[in-house]
Image (cartoon, helix red, strand yellow):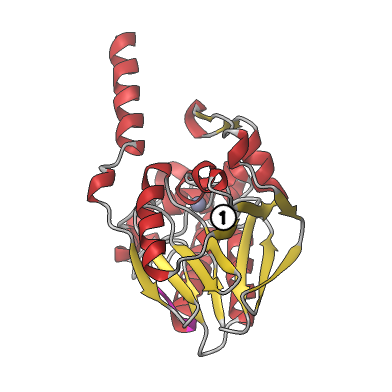
Amino acid sequence: MKIITIIFALFLSASLYCQNWDEIDIKPIKVTDNIYMLTGGGGNIGLCVGEDGIVMIDDQFAPLSEKINATLREISDQEIKYLINTHWHGDHTGGNENFANDGATIVAHDNVHKRLSTEQIRPFGRTTPASPEAAWPQLTFDERMTIHFNGQSIHLIHIHNAHTDGDAFVYFPEDNVLHMGDCFFKDRFPYIDRDMGGSPDGAIKAVELALMIADGETQIIPGHGSLANKDDLLRYHTMLITMRDRIKKVIKENVSEEDLDFDSLTQDYETWGGGFINNEKMVKTFFSAYTD
Ligand SMILES: [Zn+2]
């Protein structure tokens, strides 16, 4: 029995982490003359290209680094000078070691350094081992940092306890582009990593800050999903507020976790739970956050 459990656990972890990398294409989307978004097999990548070199935001998984480099070569013949991590999750930082070995300086919030440099205890007793030292950010910041590069003033803005405890927005005021990392899943329910310092209230505040930064012309790169604008973000905000209010209401009515009606609580958002976070996970995350 024990052996079967171990084999199943190995199969599960293999299926989670060993995607068929050969089938994944890294596709560039031109956002402005100097900024691109790359889609592929993890969180959306942002790129700022110009005469000083390349600034890249997030780097998906390690097995995709070569493909990412090949796509970069179609856009620019410069090297990656800075690699910004929007947070520590592996689908955004998996290529850190490869790109650092190629000469990129990794920049992130202090807590990204903390999480990547030490073993992390995850839900269900899982652990994520510390990353190799080359993958750790070399430049870290607390609240804010600005990188003056390629004629842009690239603002890194720490977001408190939203998706994790080390989230950052990356805002390009000159080109009016905002990369929100996983503080924005376009037209999908959020993943709020409460074990890593995330919270629903922080996630809502993050979106409210982004709504203050953005105007009708802002192009928004979400952590996952297609290139977005302020209307998309307003729709996401409405969903978050609706979920929060519905779940707080049933908590007030003393509904227990076993009696939660996932379908009615996620009514009108039936298509938002199709990905990693289904409607049950979404409701349970908010319920546990507001009953703890
Ligand atoms: Zn994430």
- Residue 202 horizontal/vertical position (percent): 63, 60
User: Tag count in the figure?
Assistant: 1
- Residue 151 horizontal/vertical position (percent): 64, 80
- Residue 187 horizontal/vertical position (percent): 38, 69
- Farthest front residue in view: 77
Question: Which residues are drawn in magenta?
Answer: 226-230
Q: Say whether residue 261 is visible.
A: no
Left or right: residue 240 compared with residue 13: right
| Identity of the residue drawn at 31% across and 10% down | 3
Q: Is the residue at mark 1 in contact range of ligand 1, meaning its CB lies under 8 Å from it?
A: yes
Q: Between 83 and 52, which is closer to the camera in this rendering?
A: 52
Position of the N terminus by quadrant: top left
148 shown above or below 137: below
**Snapshot quadrant of residue 213:** bottom right
Q: Residues within 10 Å of mark 1 (few under 14, many from 20)?
A: many
| Identity of the residue drawn at 61% across and 66% down | 169
Q: Between 175 and 78, which is closer to the camera in this rendering?
A: 78
Would you say the magenta stretch is mainly helix, strand or loop?
Answer: loop
Q: Between 287 and 187, which is closer to the camera in this rendering?
A: 187
| Identity of the residue drawn at 58% across and 70% down | 207
Left or right: residue 69 compared with residue 271: right
Q: Amino acid at mark 1?
A: His
| Identity of the residue drawn at 36% across and 57% down | 70
Q: Say whether residue 216 is visible.
A: yes
Residue under numbered circle 1: 163
Left or right: residue 76 compared with residue 81: left
**Element type at mark 1:** loop
Position of the C terminus by quadrant: top right
**Snapshot quadrant of residue 195:** top right
Residue 123 in magenta? Answer: no
